[in-house]
Image: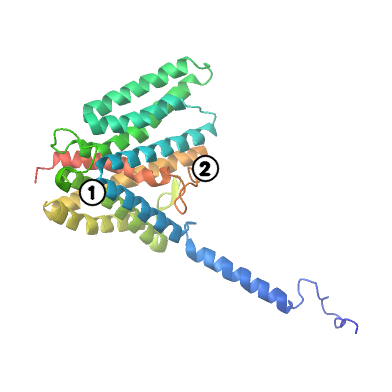
Amino acid sequence: MADPQPEAGGPPPDAPGAPASRRARREAAVAHAAAAASAASSPKTGRNLPAAIVVGLALLAAVLAGLFVWPLGFVLVGTAAGVLGVWEVFRALQTRRTNIPIVPVLIGTVAIPFSAFLGGQEAQLFALIAAAAAVLLWQSLERAEGAVTNVVGGVFVLLWIPFFVGFAVLPLHDTGLASPPLGLWPGLTVPPSVLQLVVTLLLVVANDTFGYIVGASLGRHPMAPKISPKKSWEGFAGSVAGAILIGVPGTVFLLGRPWWVGVILAIAMVGAATAGDLAESMVKRELGIKDMSSILPGHGGMMDRLDSLLFGVPIAYIVFSLLPSA
């Protein structure tokens, strides 16, 4: 039997205006469902939310396990994160033909946190100065082209990542013990300075989580549209509210401090974490990249997770140093 002919004046079967076949309608429905599922998994921000939650919880569990059980493990995790962050920035800078002396920078990235753990603030600062000098010496042995930019970039990376990571390690040194333990905490008792770091990390997580939820659903007014268009004042308000919600009970029950200490710490942490996020966004926008890498599903690169923490931890260390003792 011959194929039915189109009616006079009507479109041919394959023309754009022709009614779709049953198979075409099924395929279109499947494609539409897949697109809807993809949009649901990454609403408004392009993130894979389930993957982001799983990865975030895994990272938090590893960090808290180190703090509560094996302090050296926390130093190893923090140092490894710093090494990955430095490598990401090194690769990103290469897109603009800035080749920082990566060998001394990586050595400094390992040495600075361990110096803070074993020797405290003085050792941390000495390791930074030694690493900066090594960057200058290493570059002087390389070609002269771009030397100033490379040296400045290398010292900037040392200050931005491993030096700030060192402030996350300092509370493990400032425990009042004769020396930082390489094994478990003596008597499995977590020192007060380490509990301060736990509260600090929980506040950083609260800042990111509540800011993301509120900003993704209610964000209308950008904070810095030229640097980070998706970061909104509504999200910032959500970060403050969420940080206070976590900070007040955290300081009361974990630290035995008054509730107002939690409010002060929460506001300071949100301000610092937001500044850290915007700083990394500024660097990425200058380099013309969206994420530092794709190593963490749903998060981007390691620096996309460290950005808030790198600014927040030093501020928390200073705030706790200025507040009266419990």
Above-or-below relation of 277 to 27 = above
Residue at left offset 36%, top offset 28%: 108
The answer to the question of whether label 1 and label 2 lie on touching residues, with beta carbons closer than 8 A, is: no
Residue at left offset 37%, top offset 44%: 306
- Image location of residue 189, percent across then percent down: 15, 47
Q: Indicate which label's residue lies in the foreground, 1 or 2.
A: 1
Residue at left offset 37%, top offset 53%: 58
- Image location of residue 187, percent across then percent down: 14, 46
Can residue 316 be seen in this snapshot?
A: yes
How crowded is the residue under tag 1: few (<14 C-alpha within 10 Å), some, or many (20+)?
some
> Where on the picture, by quarter, is residue 184?
top left
Quarter that holds the N terminus: bottom right
Q: Nearer the viewer, residue 57 or 73?
A: 73
Give the SS element for disc 1. helix
Q: Residue 43: which numbered mark, if any?
A: none
Above-or-below relation of 176 to 136 = below
Q: Nearer the viewer, residue 214 or 60?
A: 60
Task: Say which residue label 2 marks.
Answer: 289
Indicate the amino acid at tag 1. Answer: Phe
Residue at left offset 23%, top offset 57%: 246
Residue sticking out furthest to the bottom: 1
The earlier-in-sequence mark between 1 and 2 is 1
How crowded is the residue under tag 2: few (<14 C-alpha within 10 Å), some, or many (20+)?
few
> Where on the picture, by quarter, is residue 154?
top left
Q: Residue 68: which numbered mark, if any?
A: 1
State how far apart marks 1 and 2 are (Cα): 37 Å
Indicate the amino acid at tag 2. Answer: Ile
- Image location of residue 256, percent across then percent down: 11, 52
